[in-house]
């Protein structure tokens, strides 16, 4: 039996969690004002960094010593300007919050899912120097460690064995490399229509590599619930924070809140709790309207270009 708790509210306040009660963090912060994911969500880049700073401090508080926090993110280009999110995140988490910088893994997406875009196609139209604008096929998994020691000897033997990593998969799928080739969530897939979701395979690797059965995984930017869905399947407890109350229905559907799964009938009912705080917001409708406007503008530009 595991417990799953979803809190709708701002993760800069995780008062529901005690100090040192979390064993792993797996999350993907919103991509700063990304045109087709979070357009205009933040008034400024400084406001975005303040969010990372505030959430980072809470993560540091609730994470047990010696354990890690994994951020899946990437630099974002908005209206021609590239924002250095990865380097700024590392600076904040290490030099302001107090984490140790442990690892960086590159998540590489299949090239077959990337078509020549308006951006990279510029050089095809103008095959000369200074017209080069590449398409991005990767994101970065930045791993931070909270100072202190994790005593592996205190893990019971039966928990160690239930948490054993499949060495064959580790070798065949090349988990040992700092570049992971994992298929991204496509726009046609169910959960991607709500927000920018990361693939379950990516979360599964991180949960298996950095936590034991029965421990607690935290995602302060839960989105559609990927982290909690995977953690629960791997017999880890999970707590997720999500500020957008409009995602409640899809999160509850994905986590089976309100109806037990077949697995629960065999191992005992999981404990599921939903908390709605006063600082929860409704964002999805507004963001979707902005995205639709941008898509229409993009289509209109494309039609004009084709006729010119």
Image (cartoon, helix red, strand yellow):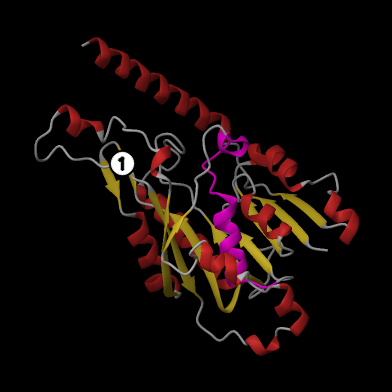
Q: Residue at x 39, y 61 (%)?
A: 89
Q: Residue 193 in the image: x percent, y percent?
A: 57, 33
The C terminus, quarter of image: top left
Q: Please name whichever residue, 24 or 243, is drawn nearer the observer in this view of the structure.
A: 24
Please check the rendered image and state whether residue 211 is part of the magenta-colored stretch, yes or no.
Answer: yes
Q: Please name whichever residue, 32 or 205, is drawn nearer the observer in this view of the structure.
A: 205
Q: Please name whichever residue, 111 or 297, is drawn nearer the observer in this view of the structure.
A: 111
Q: Residue at x 30, y 18 (%)?
A: 301
Q: Secondary structure at mark 1?
A: loop
Image vertical order of residue 20 relative to residue 17, above or below: below
Q: Residue at x 51, y 42 (%)?
A: 196
Tell me which secondary structure the magenta stretch mostly adopts: helix
Please check the rendered image and state whether residue 42 is part of the magenta-colored stretch, yes or no.
Answer: no
Q: Residue 187 in the image: x percent, y percent?
A: 52, 34
Q: Give the labeled residue for mark 1.
A: 135
Q: Residue 304 in the image: x percent, y percent?
A: 27, 13
- Residue segment shown in magenta: 189-212
Q: Please name whichever residue, 15 or 173, is drawn nearer the observer in this view of the structure.
A: 173
Residue 209 figure quarter:
bottom right
Q: Residue 204 in the image: x percent, y percent?
A: 61, 59
Q: Is residue 47 left or right of residue 230?
A: left
Q: Is residue 113 left or right of residue 262?
A: left
Q: Is residue 221 visible?
A: yes
Image vertical order of residue 165 relative to residue 233, above or below: below
């Amino acid at each position: 039996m595991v417990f799953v708790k979803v809190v709708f509210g701002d993760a800069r306040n995780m008062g529901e969690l005690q100090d040192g009660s979390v064993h792993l963090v797996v999350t993907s912060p919103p991509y700063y004002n990304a045109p087709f994911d979070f357009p205009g969500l933040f008034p400024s880049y400084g406001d975005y960094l303040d969010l990372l700073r505030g959430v980072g401090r809470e993560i540091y508080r609730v994470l047990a010593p010696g354990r890690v926090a994994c951020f899946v993110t990437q630099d974002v280009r908005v209206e021609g300007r590239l924002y250095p999110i990865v380097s700024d995140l590392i600076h904040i988490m290490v030099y302001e919050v107090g984490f140790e910088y442990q690892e960086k893994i590159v998540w590489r997406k299949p090239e077959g899912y990337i078509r020549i875009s308006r951006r990279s196609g510029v050089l095809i139209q103008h095959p000369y120097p200074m017209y080069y604008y590449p398409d991005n096929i990767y994101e970065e998994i930045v791993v931070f460690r909270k100072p202190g020691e994790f005593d592996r000897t205190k893990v019971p033997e039966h928990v160690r064995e239930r948490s054993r990593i499949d060495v064959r998969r580790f070798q065949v799928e090349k988990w040992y490399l700092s570049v992971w080739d994992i298929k991204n969530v496509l726009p046609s897939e169910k959960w991607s229509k709500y927000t920018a979701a990361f693939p379950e395979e990516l979360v599964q690797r991180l949960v298996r590599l950095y936590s034991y059965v029965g421990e607690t995984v935290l995602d302060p930017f839960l989105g559609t619930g990927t982290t909690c869905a995977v953690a629960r399947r791997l017999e880890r407890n999970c707590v997720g924070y999500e500020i957008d109350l409009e995602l409640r229905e899809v999160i509850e559907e994905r986590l089976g809140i309100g109806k037990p799964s077949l697995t629960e009938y065999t191992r005992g009912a999981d404990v599921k709790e939903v908390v709605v705080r006063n600082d929860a917001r409704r964002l999805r409708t507004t963001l979707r309207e902005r995205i639709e406007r941008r898509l229409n503008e993009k289509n209109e530009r494309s039609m004009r270009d084709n006729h010119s």
